[in-house]
Amino acid sequence: MDELNQFAANVADLYNAGSDKLDLPTARKIVKEINTFLFTCPSNIGSVYELGQKFPYFSAFHKYWHLHHRDILNLQISDEACEKVADELHEVYVRTEGKAFAEIYDTNGLSADEICRVRLLTANQDFRGSRNFKELSEIYLSDPTIFDEKQIINSPADFVKSIGITELSQNDKRVRYAKQISQFLLEHNSAPYDIIKVFDNDVTRLRNALIEFDGAGYGNKKTDMFIRDMVVLGVWNRVKGFDDIDVASDVNTIKIALRTGILTSEIPLISSFLDIFCYQYGYVDETNALAWRRVWKIWTDKYPNEAISSPCLLDYFIYNVVGKQFCKLSLCYFVCEDGHSFYWHSANNRTCQVCYKETKERKKAKMLYKLLPCDVDEGYIAIDKTPFVQSKIANPNYHQCPFKRICEQYGNKNLMPPKSISIMGQTGWNSAYTTENSGGGGLMA
Ligand SMILES: [Zn+2]
Ligand SMILES: [Zn+2]
């Protein structure tokens, strides 16, 4: 009997199906049973390896979830929905002449060599607040010696201080990352710009080397974004393996994958409180990258003349435009004392815009709720104010989310991406263990 079966049997034993009211002693036993199953650590439950360490299973449920999360969720990629999304991306490509997939940031006149140097030495600092490239390039221009890896390795703390990120959190980690990325360059005896040559112009080999290098802060996502930038900005040309780089899997690209139905799960995703040690998160993350790769493949096969050279280039449009600008609760519904109601693009509005239009008088209005722009015909009120639409790069311009009909037909726009709780740290699982006899346990924010 597996753990879930045992739990279900225990509850079934306690439960008296005939009565329509639980007696108090039974109710107590059931609450205790649920808590024991989900959140207490039995003796001899066994252990699991994570982050190079051995941890006892957090609970009987944890063991069950570890072994069965894939069967329970059964994530699928829908070819049919992928093709619809690919067709819409084709339309976006045509309307924007490809510009929607080639976000280029202001490199402030730096040479290819300098862009690579500044980006490689700072991309790993991009967590919990960061400096944008423009700010970093200003610092570089004011004194390029700050960005010398041979200096950084001896005084990494000075580097972190010079680029002005000491007031951001986790300073020890930042200093270690600065030192280790310099160490990476020194070990390969290469300047940042030439590091790709060390790996035969093969981005996959460079990627693996960066990710495997201990303590430099280059995980999958940061490495992919760094490589993507170097290719898109034309710093590195004629590289191999660029199409191996996936879209950055994060809550925004996952959200759009779930809502459009290119990625489906058998049951709605479970809460992070049940996703002990992030098995669901990891599984969704990995399948999400495959789903977007599928979209990219269908698109390139169907429209070979226009397609972009790697799934990672879907990122700007999917993550930044659809995820962060269109598919969010940005449309606000307001009412005023005189009985007017209207939609508005900003929650900060305090004025009845209907009264104002009619009488030029400013009367108070109250916001009742927020909607997705695709929920009502007036969605354009919010969509038209987004940076993407304001930039007018699409012709004809967009006034609704290009995926609106796909979400309605294949997906579900109410679906939410998964959240994760870390294993280590003050608010991590590791601090939440307890046993059945001691009680308590859990997380405290
Ligand atoms: Zn939508
Ligand atoms: Zn009014």
Image (cartoon, rainbow, N blue to C red):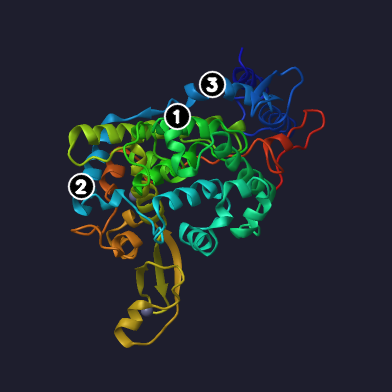
Q: Which quadrant holds the N terminus?
A: top right
Residue 339 appearing in the image: yes
**In this orientation, which residue lies closer to the viewer: 307 or 148?**
148
Nearer the viewer's eye, disc 1 or disc 2? 1
Please name the residue that numbered disc 1 is placed on. 205
Mark drawn on residue 353: none
Residue 68 tag number: 3
Residue that extends furthest to the right in the rendered view of this protein: 438
Residue 211 x/y as whole percent? 53, 33
- SS at badge 2: helix
Q: Quadrant of ligand 2?
A: bottom left
Describe the element under mark 3 as helix, strand or loop. Answer: helix
Which residue is labeled 2 in the image?
A: 91
Up-down: is 304 above or below 408? above
Report, in whole angstroms, how far the alpha carbon at label 1 lies from the one at label 3.
33 Å
- Type of amino acid under label 2: Glu
1 or 3: tag closer to the N-terminus: 3
Q: CA distance from mark 1 to mark 2?
A: 34 Å
Question: Which of pointers 1 and 2 lies earlier in the amino acid sequence?
Answer: 2
**Viewer-side residue, 264 vs 35:** 264
Nearer to us of marks 1 and 3 is: 1
Q: Residue at x 61, y 31 (%)?
A: 277
Mark 3, ligand 1, within 8 Å: the answer is no
Q: Amino acid at mark 1?
A: Arg
